[in-house]
Amino acid sequence: MNAVETIRRFNAGRDPERLAMKFANLRKSPFVFLRGTCHLFYERLPEAQMRVKAPVVWCCGDLHLENFGSFKGDNRLVYFDINDFDESALAPASWDLVRFLTSVLLAADDLKADTAEARKLCDAFVRSYAAALAAGSPRWIERDTAGGLIEDLLGSLENRTRVQHLNERTERPKRKGARRKIRCDGKRASPVSDAERARVTKMIASHAQTSSQAQTRTWPEFFDVLDVAHRIAGTGSLGLERYVVLVEGKGSPNANYLLDLKEAVPSSLVPHLKAKQPAWPTQAHRIVAVQQRMQAAPMAFLHSIERRKTSYVLRGLQPSEDRVALYESGVEFDKVQAVVEEMGRIVAWGQLRSSGRQGSAIADELIEFGSKRKAWHDELVSAARRCAKLVRKDWVSFCAAYDAGDLC
C-alpha cells in the first residue's frame, strides 16, 4: 500500500486552504502524523499482527495522548476525560489500547523520555487500565478527585472567565451598542462566505426551535447567531466543514457564547471491523451517542444537527477546555507517568460505562479481561512497537513527497 496515495485519496474534496495546513502539520513529526492519519493506522493494523483477543467495546477510535482534556459538562462541573469521538465505533478493546500505546512511543521525544522510559509509560498505562477494568466500577476525574498535573490544570481553570475567553476569540467594537465579532486571525479562525454564514445561521436557528427547554436548559433566543467563522483546530479533521459560532447567549456583550459546529464523517475503523455496527440515523448521532455513553458527563450543548445529507456535531466552545502540560521543560517523569496512569483508568471507566449497549461486551466480560492482564500485556506493547515502526516508515515517505511538492 502506498501511504502517500492513501492519504491523498482520503483527503480528496477537502477545503484546499485548511488541507494545506493539515499536510504542513503532518510534516512536523511522526506523532503529529499519527494523530492526523487515523485511517492509515487502521489500514496498517492487520499488518501489525494483532493477536490479543479482546472483548468488543465502544471505542474512542482515535485514542492518543492529545485526545484527553478538560471541559465543562452539561452539569456545570469541569472534568478531565476523553474529548474526541469522531472515529468512535464498536471494536475490540485492544484497538484503542494499541493506538494509545503507539502514540506514547511516538511522542517519547516530546516527553523527553528515552526508550526505557517510554516502555515504562506503556506498562503503567496497561496496568492502570487493567486494574480499573477489573475493579468494575466506573469513576471520573474532576477538581475534587484530581491529583498531580491534572489537578494543576483543573485548578488553573478556576481563574479563566467567559469574558476573558470572549476577548481572546472575538473583537468588540468600541462604539456603543456594537456587537462582538469573531476574530479571524488565520490561526484559530478564518472568514466564511455569505452563503456559508446563511447556511450555518439557518441550522442553528432550526436547532433552537426544535430543541426543548429541557434539552438545552435555555431558550431559543440564546442561539441567535451574531457571527460565524471557519474554525481552525485539530489535525485529522482539518479541511472538513468546521465552524465557530458566536451566539447571543445570556446577553451581549459579555454573556455571549461560542459554539463549535463540526462536520461528522464515517469512522475510519468500520471498513476493517468484523463487529456489526448499529444503523445510526446519521454519523453525528453515532458520535454524540458514544460520547454520552463513555464520558462521565457529556460536554455542554452537545447535540447532533442534520442538513440534507450532511450531519454535524454541535457543542460549546469553553474557557475550561485545555490539555495537561506534559511537554513543558522541567516536568518530572513521575508526574507524566501519573497522568498516563489516569488516562488508562479513564479509558477503562468509559468502556465500563458503555458496556452492554448495542452489542458491546457486558461488564463481567470486561472485568474478566482486565483481571487477565498478564496474558495479553506484553503482546499489546509489542503490537504497539510494530505499529510505531510502520508509522515512522510512512511518515518518512510522506515527508519526501511533501518536500518534493507532490501534495500541493
Image (tube, rainbow, N blue to C red):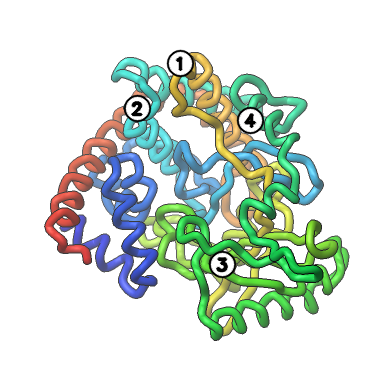
Residue placed furthest toward the front = 175
Left-right relation of 42 to 4 = right
Label 2, residues with CA under 10 Å away: few <14, some 14-19, many ≥20? some
Q: Eyeballing the image, is 14 above or below 299? A: below
Q: Eyeballing the image, is 46 above or below 303? A: above
Q: Which residue is mark 1?
A: 333
Question: Please, what is the three-letter code of the amino acid marked with disc 1?
Answer: Phe
Query: Which numbered mark, 1 or 3, is in the foreground of this view?
Result: 3
Q: Which residue is mark 4?
A: 153
Q: Which residue is mark 3?
A: 243
Residue 288 image label:
none
Question: Please, what is the three-letter code of the amino acid marked with disc 3?
Answer: Tyr
Query: Which numbered mark, 3 or 2, is in the foreground of this view?
Result: 3
Q: Residue at x 86, y 64 (%)?
A: 218
Q: Where residue 177 appears, x then y in whole percent? A: 80, 70
SS label for mark 2: loop
Question: Please, what is the three-letter code of the amino acid marked with disc 2?
Answer: Ala
* Of callouts 3 and 2, the N-terminal one: 2
* Of callouts 1 and 2, the N-terminal one: 2
Q: Residue at x 40, y 55 (%)?
A: 236
Distance between mark 2 and mark 4 Cα atoms:
22 Å
The quarter of the picture where residue 313 lies is bottom right
* Of callouts 4 and 1, the N-terminal one: 4
SS label for mark 4: helix
* Of callouts 1 and 3, the N-terminal one: 3
Label 1, residues with CA under 10 Å away: few <14, some 14-19, many ≥20? some
Question: Please, what is the three-letter code of the amino acid marked with disc 4?
Answer: Leu
Q: Which residue is mark 2?
A: 108
Query: Which numbered mark, 4 or 1, is in the foreground of this view?
Result: 4
Q: Where residue 17 appears, x then y in whole percent? A: 36, 68
